[in-house]
Image: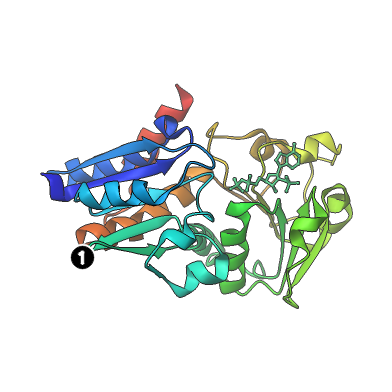
Amino acid sequence: MKKNKAIVIGQSVSKSLSPTIFNYWFSKYKIKGKYEYLEIQKNKLEKKIFTKLINMKIKGFNVTIPHKESIMPYLDFVDSHSKKIGAVNCVTIKRKKLHGSNTDWIGYYKTINKITKKQERVRNQAIVVGYGGASKAIVYALLKLKYKKIHIFNRTLNKMKNIKNKNIKTYHINEIKKHISQSNIIVNTIPVNIFKLLNIPKKLPPKFIVSDIVYRPFETSFLKHFKNPKEKTYGISMLINQAIPCFEKWFGFKPTANKELFEILKKELDK
Ligand code: ATR
């Protein structure tokens, strides 16, 4: 029993949806497993936590806010994607060593790839709202999806000063309005609806995607703001799709992202 255990560590993890996702798969695939959470406050990450996790003989653990970046020095190995993104959300324990990977970007890549395959000319210019920890994996995924130009808007300009990529342009968040018409997708990574705060019209150019990585509530005020998007993607989609490669690393096969799981999570968020 012990060897099929996994955990999520972070702040306010009692509200995390990851236990629901993993325990759903355990039940679906008849695996005797258990996925739990461990609350670790900001600035409370320390070596002895990892010794404890290794001794618990778990397969691995997920890392969430606010530790995705600060965990990196504690890991024995970090994959190339995590290094480029600067964050880890999935750790596999093998022979008492900690192997860090980033599957957030895969979760977002899968979410967008599924819908953009159907659309023409959509992989062109993207708007990303916010530049915190989560946003870095999104920008990485958009570059992998071959968006030609990514416009990032953040309230704190200073946080974007180290970006050195000719396909990325950075701006203050108050400047979003005039850039919308050149883009095909807006990705929101911040907890407020900046479009309402800035009085941005609800009508979008045609063939537009609005995409939120925030999943609480299920339909955020950002997603509700625009009246005519061609497609909407919900935060839950990225969440499920980042969990799939993590599950595979720990348990050796790829679980499926089916409609039933999506509905279970939606129901949990609507409670
Ligand atoms: P996450 O891991 O979810 O990205 P984070 O690293 O704390 O969390 O980043 C939060 C993002 O939301 C940042 O881009 C932050 O902007 P700042 O860099 O200026 O702090 C943004 N954010 C949070 N509250 C905001 C608000 N009220 N208005 C605009 N941006 C906000």
Asked if one can make out residue 31 in the rendered structure from this viewpoint, the answer is no
Mark 1 surroundings within 10 Å by alpha-carbon count, few (fewer than 14), some (14 through 19), many (20 or more): few
Q: Is residue 217 left or right of residue 19?
A: right
The answer to whether 3 is drawn above or below residue 150 in the figure is above
In the picture, measured across the screen, residue 167 lies left or right of residue 74, that is right
Residue 263, x across and y down, in percent? 38, 36
Q: Residue at x 21, y 50 (%)?
A: 55
> Dot 1 corresponds to which residue?
95
Residue at image point 63% right, 63% down: 139
Q: Is residue 228 visible?
A: yes
> What percent of the width, then of the height, locates residue 177?
86, 50
Does 154 sit left or right of 239 as displayed? Answer: right
- Residue found at x 51% / y 63%: 109
Question: In what quadrant of the picture does the C terminus appear?
Answer: top left
Q: Residue at x 73, y 37 (%)?
A: 193
| Image mark count | 1
Residue 147 in picture, x, y percent from top left: 66, 71
On the image, the x and y values in percent for residue 223 come to 64, 40
26 to the left or right of 256: left
Question: Looking at this view, is 250 or 236 the one in front?
Answer: 250
Q: Nearer the viewer, residue 12 or 200?
A: 12
Task: Report ligand 1 position as a quadrant.
Answer: top right
Residue 2, quarter of picture: top left
User: Cβ(mark 1) to ligand 1 < 8 Å?
Assistant: no
Q: Secondary structure at mark 1?
A: loop
Q: Which quarter of the image is occupied by the N terminus?
A: top left
